[in-house]
Amino acid sequence: MPIEEQKNSEEYSESSIQVLKGLEAVRMRPSMYIGDVGSRGLHHLVYEAVDNSIDEALGGYCKNIEVCINEDGSISIIDDGRGIPTGIMQEEGKSALEVVLTVLHAGGKFDKSNYKVSGGLHGVGISCVNALSESLTAEVRRDGKIYRMRFSRGVALGPIEEAGATDLCGTVITFKPDAQIFTQTTEFSYDILASRLRELAFLNKGISLSIIDKRSTKDDDDGAAEGGVPAHRSDVFFSQDGLKEFVDYLDASREKLIEKPIYLETEKNGVPVEIALQYNSGFSENVHSYVNNINTIEGGTHLSGFRRGLTTTLKNFAEKSGMLAKLKLEIDPADFREGLTAVISVKVAEPQFEGQTKTKLGNNEVTAAVSQAVSAALENYLEENPRDAKLIVDKVVLAATARHAARKAREIVQRKTVLSGAGLPGKLSDCSDRDPARCEIYLVEGDSAGGTAKQGRDKTFQAILPLRGKILNVEKAMEHKIFDSEEIKNIFTALGVTIGTEEDSKALNIAKLRYHKIIIMTDADVDGSHIATLIMTFFFRYMVDLIKNGYLYIATPPLYLVKKGKQEQYCWTEDQRQVAIEEIGRGKDASVHVQRYKGLGEMNAVQLWDTTMNPAYRTLRRVSIESAAEADRIFSMLMGDDVAPRRSFIEAHAKYARIDA
Ligand code: 0RA
């Protein structure tokens, strides 16, 4: 039943038209509001709803947030906050609930006391989610009552209703994304959502974030609980110690230098700053920065402030304590960050986001705030922990020494690339087109598969670079070893990418990149996926800009050929194989032949072209970084010394890994 009739129907229809115009704009150009209408945009809807609950939690009103993927593919975001207000707002003549759900950017309108610190990448508000949902139901528990309101594509299906009594408090938003908008997929990924909730739990200590997947567990063969009832996948993420635990989590597979992460939590010039950092025995820099819970993968002023604070403080300390006396070489700022894992989280009231993906913080005042916070805390730590201080400075000195050795090896790579054309690797079969936007390069495992690919390709735009066996594991090797590796030098020279400038020894120069599609093609078996992972790790650590620009891809060769007489069908999954056997095998003389492709080498050139290289039919998977922190952790685990976590990860994720076993 409606709780209150609209008082002034004229006023109401006027504001309704406004609302419709606003939400119609969202439906006309959804990408402007949520980034894209692919999987990323789809999951963004959930983040937007979760962010509202996080804001409520940061205000101190809510402790538990739950995400439930429902059986029908809709999703619910449940919190135990105060509940979105349901009273009628004077100005609009509508309930606050309706305003929040139908007016763009209405979020912060009610409560100015706790400024919005959370907030999705685009900060668009829950009304966008409503506009892009086939159906949305908001349920508010407040003042002993349950209120409910339903919408379809942003349009209210009726007035706000009372739906019973309750002792609870909180908000439940349930929505089903609109398939007219999300034409690629409307299916939520448990892993993507869980990974974001885990990150949010680390970034917002003390808040419990949980997820449960109530969809069918057909494909999940280890999901059966005792008694044969399929268990629903679920996780609870809760962090008592916040960023300290985040750093420990990221470094789980690394050997740490000091016992506990160095931690600071403070407020400088009105900017809350929280940082945890740890050094490990590895060589890569893994610094992750966040502004208002958003991963700023392009960095910005907070990251500059962190680097400045770290470099000056460590340098001063090392000089003052005479630890650099033996060192004849110049120390580079990058030397202070070798084997460093850190997470930086700042809250900025009015963030300015810049850069290609709007994930670079522009607010100038933040640099000094973070730099001062880091200097103060780090000076203190080094004074109080002289043994740790020595370990860290020794590590920096070692990094500087190694860097000088690496420079020699790297200069060779640079010299070779400068002489492009003449300098191209002998193993490269180049394409004839010279426009990088049209050109592709296949990095192929093994000389024999390389030969097949060379025969099968379209040589106007497809180049082939065979790689011999396993390329170097960059996660474990020192930098000068990496630039000594023939395979790695070949990749650099073939791509036309150089590394290192006068000012920054690690800067990547991709202006002369020769191909805009770099395609990793390996066997569809355990070894093949290991090699693909090695190559991806190399790109992630040394050419991450290529991944950020969306240039790195993985080819997907088929797993099976199902054949009867002249009828042939390639299959990529177990399900496809079953279907193909049934379809092709119909009739009496059901002599269906199933060929399992173990490697690329088993296909001839025509088959390889048809299934894996022909742009008209192939499937390429673009390598993207959903969460840089999670990618970092997974690569260090997959490539590190510890065998057990690697095995369990591969068993859980690589379905075909089990077929061979
Ligand atoms: C504005 C004011 C108040 C609560 C909220 C918004 C609120 C919004 C969301 C969205 C998801 N969960 C939420 N929980 C709360 C509180 C006003 C008051 O009670 O004084």
Image: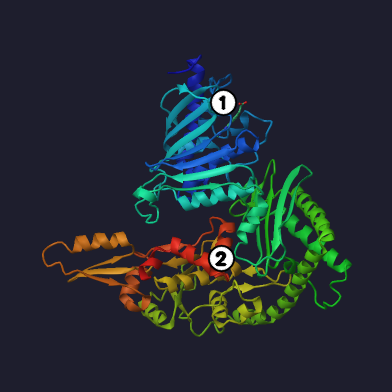
Q: Is residue 383 above or below residue 641?
A: above
Is 573 rendered above or below residue 49? below
Residue 566 position, x and y percent, is 18, 71
**Residue 472 shown left or right of residue 306 in the figure:** left
Q: Are marks 2 and 1 in contact (CB under 8 Å)?
A: no
Work out how far the residue at label 2 is from the one at label 1, CA to CA, in angstroms.
Answer: 46 Å
Amino acid of disc 1: Pro
**Residue shown at the point (58%, 50%) measured from the top left:** 199
Choose between 373 and 255: the one closer to the eye: 255
Disc assigned to residue 85: 1
Q: What residue lies at 38% left-to-right and 66% top-to-bottom?
A: 658
Q: Quadrant location of the C terminus?
A: bottom left
| x then y, percent, for residue 612 | 37, 69
In the figure, residue 286 lies in which quadrant? bottom right
The residue that mark 2 highlights is 637
- Labels 2 and 1: the sequence-earlier one: 1
The answer to whether mark 1 is within 8 Å of ligand 1 is yes
Nearest the viewer among 5 and 378 is 378
As shown in the figure, which amino acid type bears the numbered disc 2? Met
Q: Residue furthest left?
A: 588
Residue 160 seen in the figure: no
- 228 vs 577, nearest the viewer: 228
Q: From the top left corner, tell me how far across and down residue 412 is, in percent.
A: 64, 82
Tell me what residue is drawn at x 67 percent, y 46 percent. Answer: 352
Can you say whether 624 is above or below 268 in the image?
below
Tag 1's secondary structure? loop
